[in-house]
Image: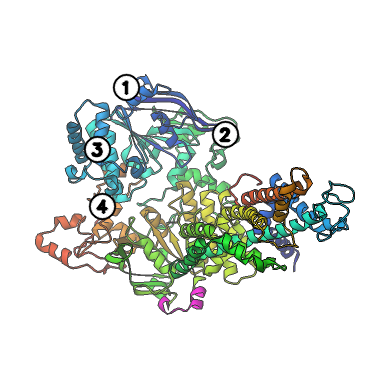
């Protein structure tokens, strides 16, 4: 390779750099909101997964010498009525809630985007069948079904729980996505891709879904909150995550009874829930702007 | 000379920090037509709205607008209302949004009458019918009771004109009144405007980007650039003795219907400046071939040059006047000076002669057929009912058309909206078996293609769309857009190729990381062309590729297309409604009417001596940017609108509007009504679908 060729190759690399992922990431991280949200969420994960190593108590341990004690050097965040260490159980609950919340949101939004886009793009029978499924799921009483299925979630089958939660969250979005796809399909850049010989599924994933990313990001953000909250509600009523495992929801449910005279039993769990939802919302907001090249922010 | 009815002086419009209009002044007298021309963003429409007092409240307007001596700028709303409609009225671009959809057309015109005149409802209605008759709407009494959606575009614009002249105004401001209309309808509407002006004796301010419309219609012309008037004068002075390089560039970049041969157009380099960030000094400096250092120092005022009434804002106008420089000279000088930048096009003095000279050495018959379409049919069913769908009719979008394109050749497919040209294009692009007839691309019948062959064939056939912004995915960088076809067809070295492509269409390869909206319209279209060329296709289908662009930008893209065709040996199917552009680019042309080909043949022959009455009417309807020729031309005005493709007339489809049909005897007419004419060759490479075709020179 001559020197000139090498130079050319270097320049080629240079213009190859801006892949979509990188551009979005760069825009995302130049936004203060994005940085803040990302840092906050990272901190939450760090706390939830690294935190338990800083105490010798585990979430199943009971300290029979300390019932309902305020925070101290021995129990950083105090103890519950049962003698359980609040720091240990809260972090355990947060692990569950973070994983459940994020996974449910990602699964639900992905499902909504894929089903909606395929239905809207192909129309005809694909559309009819997919929309029948959507309508069917819409009329099922989700809360009741989750409640009935709750015994199945015991014994660590939280993956099933995530799937069930996601299954009842995606339908409305998929209808919106379908509608947007029908109008997007008329746009010339979709025709251009079609006439280029790009296969339909590739068009859907490369052109249709990215052009709805604003909607999808907002939807995913909202889904994180609503998944955590649904899980919390279910756990509050005694369904959802089953003892001896804990979640933020079950902790808040228990803590609310003692919140008035022993605030540490309630406020740590509630505070972390609020911070998690806040950080996810900040990230969602910034992601939406980062995906949208017309947005003035972060460019 | 009578006093001016409308005087505008030092008009300034600001939106926040952006000065959209900067010190525009003009005056019009009764019975006079002033044409205001300029490209998009030059501030011509804002000027009109400011005069009418119709700008939104956040616009800051200063200066003076005097109507019959009364200052109306900053006047009270009540005073303005008394003037609007009565003394000054306006015709807007989009006739559909200018009429209220829920009221009958007659009532709307009657309302315009009653607002300013003390008449009864009956009298107003009678006047409304009179006005509809004046603007040439057939059956005015009956049509007055119709709703706007029952009117076609041309009829709606006539109704709007009827409203504008309802109170015998002194001034009519027309803002691009014919831009949304087809050429034959445009000719009708311009005719009506002329008639209306004769009836009322009003002054007309005609705002347009079409230099042809102004040439035949206006008495005086004002050229706007970047919010300022840069040249004003009598129409002949502006067209034959322009003194401002921008005006010269504008005239040079218009494709001419009457110019034979394949001369490269003269584009103005660069893009119009954004009103938010004007360059210092004369705003045209960065694009001007005659710019000197002094140009960038101060903005030149409008000063008289050769003779009264002709003003130009250029410090070198005197020089231009003294040496009587023509536009070609000014822009040729540029070619010599900057020859290294712009690859100087072929010697301009290419002989304007027959096809043999222009085409490649091999005669047409000897070259391979790239695309052949035979008896292509596309019908859409019209259905009714929600539960039990039943077919109530058929839209004959394309009804049996035949043509072929050979290697290195450009076929222009022209016609008005609704004639089926875009449907034809889509049918070819789909690469599936048509409803009837055959499509063969590179000798392969598309009906017999398997999925894999079809994908492989797409590599050889690409498309460029009309709207460059809509055809580029807004969420992808230019790099990704250009790499997409390469990746789809399994090419690895996308990076090098993208660089080559950007270079090929005259864009900076360093801009690959940008998004489409960071580019101007012309640059976006270049990206679209680059994408189409990525896989080195043999055939490129162009769907109105320049109709969304300004003239000065359009010229550059037209030259690029022509240059690429020659360098890469491409064949084009060029779908367009602009016949002047087609004459510049095409070797052969097919004229479509209601899903059928009316005339097909060599460009020079079809334009020089059209034989089908529709081609003749179409060509005669296109205004030329040449005032003297324009005044002496005879227009063949077609009556009425395009019939619905759901119910095409029996026999010859054009007979309902055909001027020739009217002149025939009853005996001769039978053939037109009963027998649908096929395209039959009448001359060397010229076929016509008319029973009684004869040559006629119309351009």
Residue to which mark 4 is pinned: B641
Residue to which mark 3 is pinned: B107
Disc 1 and disc 3: Cα gap in Å? 35 Å
- Residue B61: image x %, image y %? 47, 27
Q: Which of marks 4 and 1 is in front?
A: 4
**In the rendered structure, are the residues bearing label 2 and label 4 in contact, judged by CB atoms less than 8 Å apart?**
no
The answer to whether residue A181 is seen in the rendering is yes
Q: Which of marks 2 and 3 is in front?
A: 3
Main secondary structure type of the part rendered in magenta: helix
N-term-proximal mark, 1 vs 2: 1
- Residue A286: image x %, image y %? 65, 49
Figure quadrant of the N terminus of chain A: bottom right
Q: The disc numbered 1 marks a residue on which chain?
A: B
Could you say which is closer to the camera, residue B386 or residue B678?
Answer: B386
Instruction: Find numbered disc 2 in the image and state the secondary structure of the residue it sits on.
Output: helix
Instruction: Find numbered disc 1 in the image and state the secondary structure of the residue it sits on.
Output: loop
Q: The disc numbered 2 marks a residue on which chain?
A: B
Question: Which portion, as a residue range, is magenta?
Answer: B444-456
Residue to which mark 2 is pinned: B295
Label number found at residue B3 = 1
The answer to whether residue B595 is seen in the rendering is no
Report the side of A279 relative to B670 (left or right): right
Mark 2 neighbour class, 10 Å CA radius: few under 14, some 14 to 19, many 20 or more: many
Say whether mark 4 and mark 3 are on the same chain: yes
N-term-proximal mark, 1 vs 3: 1
Disc 2 and disc 3: Cα gap in Å? 55 Å
Say whether mark 3 and mark 1 are on the same chain: yes
Disc 1 and disc 2: Cα gap in Å? 36 Å
């Amino acid at each position: 390779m001559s020197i000139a060729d090498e130079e050319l190759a270097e320049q080629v690399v240079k213009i190859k750099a801006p892949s979509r992922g990188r551009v979005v990431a760069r825009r995302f991280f130049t936004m203060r909101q994005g940085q803040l949200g990302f840092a906050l969420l990272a901190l939450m994960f760090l706390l939830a997964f690294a935190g338990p190593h800083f105490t010798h108590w585990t979430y199943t341990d009971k300290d029979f010498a300390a019932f309902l004690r305020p925070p101290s050097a021995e129990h950083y965040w105090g103890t519950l009525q049962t003698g359980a260490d609040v720091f240990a159980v809260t972090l355990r609950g947060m692990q569950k809630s973070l994983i459940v919340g994020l996974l449910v949101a990602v699964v639900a939004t992905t499902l909504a985007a894929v089903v909606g886009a395929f239905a809207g793009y192909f129309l005809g029978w694909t559309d009819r069948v997919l929309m029948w499924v959507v309508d069917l799921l819409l009329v099922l009483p989700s809360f009741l079904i989750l409640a009935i299925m709750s015994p199945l979630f015991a014994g660590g089958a939280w993956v099933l729980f995530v799937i069930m939660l996601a299954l009842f969250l995606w339908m409305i979005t998929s209808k919106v996505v379908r509608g947007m796809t029908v109008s997007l399909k008329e746009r010339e850049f979709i025709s251009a891709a079609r006439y280029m010989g790009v296969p339909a599924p590739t068009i859907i994933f490369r052109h249709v879904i990215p052009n709805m990313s604003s909607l999808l990001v907002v939807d995913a953000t909202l889904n994180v909150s609503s998944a955590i909250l649904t899980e919390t509600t279910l756990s509050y009523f005694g369904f959802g995550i089953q003892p001896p495992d804990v979640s933020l929801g079950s902790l808040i449910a228990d803590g609310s009874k003692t919140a008035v005279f022993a605030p540490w039993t309630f406020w740590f769990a509630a505070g972390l829930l609020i911070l998690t939802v806040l950080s996810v919302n900040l990230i969602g907001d910034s992601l939406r702007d980062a995906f949208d090249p017309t947005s003035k922010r972060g460019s | 000379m009578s006093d001016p009815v409308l005087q505008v002086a030092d008009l300034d419009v600001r939106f926040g920090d952006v000065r959209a209009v900067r010190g525009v002044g003009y005056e019009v007298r009764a019975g006079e037509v002033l044409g205001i021309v300029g490209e998009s963003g030059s501030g011509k429409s804002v000027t009109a709205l400011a005069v009418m007092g119709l700008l939104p409240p956040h616009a800051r307007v200063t200066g003076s607008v005097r109507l019959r001596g009364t200052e109306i700028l900053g006047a009270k709303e009540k005073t303005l209302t008394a003037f609007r409609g009565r003394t000054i009225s306006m015709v807007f671009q989009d006739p559909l949004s200018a009429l209220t959809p829920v009221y009958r057309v007659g009532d709307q015109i009657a309302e315009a009458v009653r607002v300013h005149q003390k008449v009864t409802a009956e009298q107003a209605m009678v006047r409304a019918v009179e006005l509809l008759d004046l603007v040439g709407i057939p059956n005015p009494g009956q049509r007055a009771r119709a709703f706007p959606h029952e009117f076609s575009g041309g009829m709606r614009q006539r109704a709007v004109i009827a409203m504008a002249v309802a109170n015998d105004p002194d001034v009519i401001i027309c803002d691009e009144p014919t831009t949304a209309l087809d050429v034959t309808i445009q000719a009708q509407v311009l005719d009506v405007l002329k008639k209306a002006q004769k009836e009322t004796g009003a002054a007309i301010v005609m705002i347009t980007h079409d230099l042809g419309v102004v040439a035949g219609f206006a008495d005086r012309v004002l050229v706007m650039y970047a919010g300022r008037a840069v040249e004003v004068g009598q129409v002949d002075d502006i067209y034959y003795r322009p003194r401002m390089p921008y005006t010269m560039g504008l005239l040079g970049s218009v494709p001419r219907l009457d110019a034979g041969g394949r001369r490269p157009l003269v584009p103005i380099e660069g893009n119009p400046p954004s009103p938010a960030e004007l360059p210092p000094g004369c705003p045209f400096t960065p694009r001007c071939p005659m710019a000197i250092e002094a140009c960038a120092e101060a903005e030149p005022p409008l000063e008289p040059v050769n003779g009264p009434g002709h003003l130009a804002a250029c410090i070198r106008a005197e020089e231009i006047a003294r040496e009587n420089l023509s536009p070609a000279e000014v822009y040729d000088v540029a070619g010599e000076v900057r020859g290294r930048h712009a690859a100087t096009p072929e010697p301009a003095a290419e002989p304007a002669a027959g096809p043999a000279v222009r085409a490649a050495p091999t005669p047409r018959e000897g070259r391979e057929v790239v695309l052949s379409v035979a008896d292509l049919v596309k019908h859409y069913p019209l259905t009714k009912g929600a539960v039990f769908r039943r077919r109530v009719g058929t839209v004959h979008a394309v009804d049996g058309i035949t043509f072929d394109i050979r290697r290195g050749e450009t076929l222009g497919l022209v016609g008005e909206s609704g004639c089926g040209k875009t449907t034809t294009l889509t049918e070819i692009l789909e690469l599936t078996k048509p409803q009837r007839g055959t499509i063969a691309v590179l000798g392969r019948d598309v009906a017999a293609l398997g999925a894999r062959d079809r994908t492989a064939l797409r590599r050889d056939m690409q498309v460029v769309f009309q709207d460059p912004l809509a055809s580029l995915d807004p969420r992808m960088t230019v790099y990704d857009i250009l790499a997409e076809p390469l990746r789809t067809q399994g090419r690895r070295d996308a990076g090098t190729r993208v660089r080559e492509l950007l270079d090929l269409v005259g864009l900076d390869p360093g801009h690959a990381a940008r998004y489409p909206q960071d580019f101007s319209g012309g640059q976006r279209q270049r990206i679209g062309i680059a994408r189409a060329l990525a896989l080195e296709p043999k055939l490129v289908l162009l769907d109105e590729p320049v109709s969304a662009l300004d003239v000065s930008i359009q010229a550059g893209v037209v030259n690029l297309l022509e240059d690429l065709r020659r360098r890469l040996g491409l064949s084009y199917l060029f779908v367009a409604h602009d016949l002047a552009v087609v004459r510049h680019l095409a070797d052969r042309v097919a004229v479509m009417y209601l899903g059928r080909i009316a005339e097909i043949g060599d460009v020079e022959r079809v334009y020089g001596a059209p034989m089908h009455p529709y081609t003749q009417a179409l060509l005669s309807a296109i205004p030329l940017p040449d005032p003297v020729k324009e005044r002496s031309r005879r227009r063949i005005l077609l009556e009425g609108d395009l019939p619905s493709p759901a119910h095409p007339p029996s026999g010859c489809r054009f007979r309902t509007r055909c001027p020739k049909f009217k002149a025939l005897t009853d005996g001769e007419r039978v053939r037109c009504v009963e027998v649908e004419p096929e395209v039959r060759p009448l001359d060397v490479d010229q076929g016509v679908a008319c029973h009684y075709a004869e040559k006629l020179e119309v351009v």
